[in-house]
Amino acid sequence: MKLTRDRVFSLLPAVLGILLSVGVMTVFSACGMEEHGKLMPCHGAQNVAELGGFVLFFLFSFGAILKGRGLKLFLFAAGVIGAVGLFFVPGDIMPLCMMKTMRCHEVFQPFVRLVSAVIVVSGAAGFVRVMRSRSK
């Protein structure tokens, strides 16, 4: 597999998907456990964001590596739709903690939204590149 400029641009959303998964489990994680050992409400959103980042990684990776134009378009479209859905996970689809000063509101949610928005833009750009390509 030759690493061309088109392939590098196609792999960008995949790399961002891994960055999202690793980031939400390490530096940009949601709140920790409560004092009595119970998980905070935002822990579920963190798990969904981690899994979503890995799913986006696989969708965009296969979209960049595989040959069929129709399959590439499908994978990139699915990745963009998934990234849009992931944007709304923290706070909209899944609850975060009640206090706006908690780590999940100040660190986790902005990180997930920023990275997923960049994935949407780069994935859409990859989709357009595939649409404009002449190879079948």
Image (spheres, helix red, strand yellow):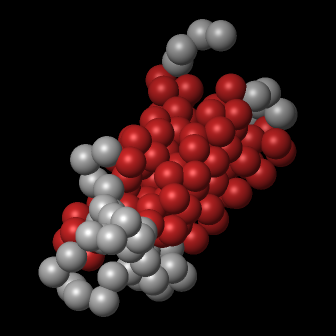
In this orientation, which residue lies closer to the viewer: 123 or 59? 59
Q: Is residue 94 above or below residue 126?
A: below
103 on left or right of 39: left
- Give the residue displayed 52% in from the left and 18% down from the top: 4
128 on left or right of 73: left
Position in image of residue 20 (x %, y %): 41, 48
Residue 44 shows in the view: yes
Q: Is residue 106 above or below residue 63?
A: below
Q: Is residue 61 above or below residue 90?
A: above
- Residue furthest to the left in view is 101
- Give the residue displayed 68% in from the left and 26% down from the top: 65
- Give the residue displayed 28% in from the left and 54% down from the top: 28
- Residue furthest to the top in view is 2
In the rendered image, which quarter contains the C terminus?
Answer: top right
Position in image of residue 103 (x %, y %): 22, 69
Position in image of residue 6 (x %, y %): 53, 29
- Give the residue displayed 63% in from the left and 48% down from the top: 55
Position in image of residue 74 (x %, y %): 77, 51
106 on left or right of 135: left
Task: State the image quarter where residue 100 is shown.
Answer: bottom left
In this orientation, which residue lies closer to the viewer: 131 or 20? 20
